[in-house]
Image (cartoon, rainbow, N blue to C red):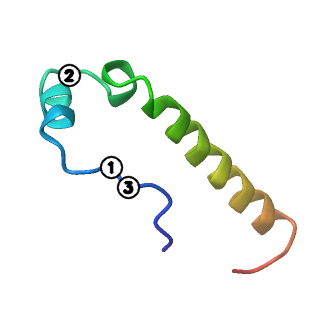
Amino acid sequence: IPILLTIPLDTGIARLYSKGITLIEGIPQWRERFLGLFDKIREMVNERGSGSKR
């Protein structure tokens, strides 16, 4: 299973989710990273759909 994105062990991030705040709401720069993750997943799905195997 490929690792497509890692989220660091960070006390600031932990504080956010302990308050129920999403990472994107608390640190907007993460939005681009998650959009990139979505693009990677979409590419992988499209590759599988076109018959190529990984």
Q: Provide residue 19's location: percent of width, then percent of height.
A: 14, 21
Q: CA distance from mark 3 to mark 1?
A: 4 Å
Q: Which residue is mark 3?
A: 6
Kindly indicate whether the residue at mark 2 contacts the one at mark 1 (C-beta within 8 angstroms). Answer: no
Q: Looking at the picture, which amino acid does disc 2 mark?
A: Gly
Q: Residue at x 63, y 53 (%)?
A: 41
State yes or no: discs 3 and 1 in contact (Cβ < 8 Å): yes
- Give the residue drawn at x 69%, y 80%: 54
Q: Give the alpha-carbon distance from disc 1 to disc 2, as whole Å.
A: 17 Å
Instruction: Please indicate whether residue 9 sits to the left or right of residue 30 in the image.
Output: left
Residue 35: name its quadrant: top right
Q: Mark 3 to mark 2: distance in Å?
A: 20 Å
Which of disc 2 and disc 1 is earlier in sequence? 1
Which residue, given by chain and number where applicable, does mark 1 sit on? 7
Q: Secondary structure at mark 1?
A: loop
Q: Are marks 3 and 2 in contact (CB under 8 Å)?
A: no
Disc 2 designates what residue? 20
Q: Residue at x 60, y 44 (%)?
A: 36
